[in-house]
Amino acid sequence: MSHERTQVLVVGGSLVGLSTALFLRRHGVDVVLVERHAGTSIHPRTPGYNARTMELFRAAGMEEAVRAAGPWRLNGSGLLWAESLTSPNHHWLAPPNAHSVQDGFADVSPCDDAVLSQDVLEPVLREHAEALGADLRFGTELTEFDSASDGVTATLTVRSSGTRVTVRADYLVAADGAASAVRARLGIGTSGVGVLEHVAGIMVRADLGAALRDRRFAICQVDNPRFSGMVRVVGDKIALHVTFRPDRGESADQFTGERCVELTRAAVGLPDLAVEPLDVLPWQMTAAVADRFAEGRVFLAGDAAHVMPPAGAYGANTGIQDAANLAWKLAYVLHGWAGAALLDTYDAERRPVAQLTVEQALATGRAWFGADLPSEVAAIELIDEVAMKFGYHYRAGEAPVEDPRRPTGRPGTRAPHVWLLRDGKQVSTVDLWASGLVLLAGPGGAAWVEAASAVAGRDGLPLTAYRVVREEAQCALPQLADPVGRWARLSGVTGGAAVLIRPDGFVAWRAEEASGQDPADALTDGLQRVLQGA
């Protein structure tokens, strides 16, 4: 048996695992990822990625590649309801409290939502992660692991040959799905409503060609006497999601190839349609959150940490945002810029967000579909979609979201998006934190910019700094122009004040005038509190 060494071992090669590997490599961390399946998913599943997730892909340098991979244009906003895919009897069901597709998110983000399926996105993530040097091993599974105070020792098995490899890693990230074997091995339980439905995910191939008559949708709820369920069409593949009742003796095994053909024809509305059955993937619609997201040097992310109903498409987005939160923290600890206590903030920050999001997915299903849900769901107040996407924060004890259109700029909240000018060219504040920590000072904050340069030069910390002024002018210090004063208005950074933004776009620290204490000392103290998880 051979022995290898890496900094982070990621278990699971779906959306969240691949995103974790991508984000870690962007921060210069060695990573090995293992996935038991031979390749990326063939099931469409997640229909799209919200604008906050697209900000993270933008920071990773792959927003354009994601959009190019899925140029999916819809005829309407929300969910299409139809008697069959080809029936003239259809209408659109708008999601509750939704932001109009036509409106976009230009007031709060440089990005908009992207509509594409999981099977299309995963190869893009894989390509970019591998290009950055991630060691991705499909067809390989984690068969054993032991976690100690100084690292994790894992046994990996190549499924095709049985070859075993021992890998020693500093940390392990479990992104191995709702039935996480890693979570079970650690004895971490889950809390929440639990299983709501048992679903058979049926994948078939059929050429609908002109049959859809240019009808374009992300998901269609089809209801007729012979079929009731959710349907998605991606190219020549059709995904059908049909509930079954184990308490009545039903099982996923009853979805034979013949039955899958019959159900597809009923859903499409074409009794003679040529259909090729491909796969049946049973899954459980569940609402639950892991009781903790970390155990020693092992961390849970994505479905291993939280599962939720598909209403609102929150699940994958929440998982990818987990990955961004965790990746920069692991990187800064591994590079020696932060103390291990910073990693404790992963559970403290992300678990409350997951709990909130699971509740909102339940409330969305209730309001959108009139879903039959437990009575406690009726008490959940539905939150505006824009606030859910951009307004969640890491300030314990406060209201769970703030209005991102009226940001406070306080530590723990997302830094507002503003278009600024750098050397005469537009740049969003979202683009500034893509390479690491960034300090933005007011017009009178030259001392903060100088201090940031000194601290970064001394510690090797990826920290850039700018003075934000109304008009660009000749200056020895880096600066950005805010001609209309929008940044000052939204962030509250005026005069000699300054704000420090984390590599995931959240405000880490802020200070007013640099008076009474040497700016370099004040900034060093602020950084130490942030990077020690205080």
Image: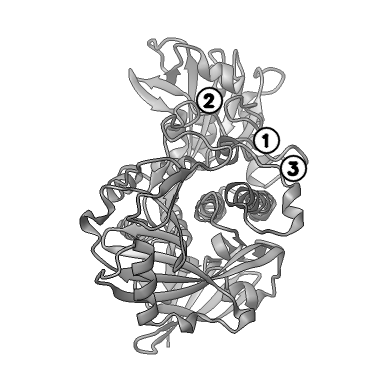
Q: Nearer the viewer, mark 2 or mark 1?
A: 2
- Residue beneath disc 1: 525
- Residue beneath disc 2: 440
Q: State which tag comes first along the sequence, 2 or 1.
A: 2
Residue at 27% over, 58% down: 235
Q: Nearer the viewer, mark 3 or mark 1?
A: 3
As rendered, which of 2 and 256 lies closer to the eye?
256
Count of labels in the image: 3
Which amino acid does the dot numbered 2 rest on?
Answer: Leu
Please state the horizontal and vertical placement of residue 371, each as a whole percent of the image.
62, 56
- The C terminus: image quadrant: top right
Q: Nearer the viewer, mark 3 or mark 2?
A: 3
Q: Is residue 50 left or right of residue 148?
A: left
Q: Residues within 10 Å of mark 1 (few under 14, many from 20)?
A: few
- Distance from disc 3 to disc 1, alpha carbons, whole Å, reads 22 Å
Q: State which tag comes first along the sequence, 3 or 1.
A: 3
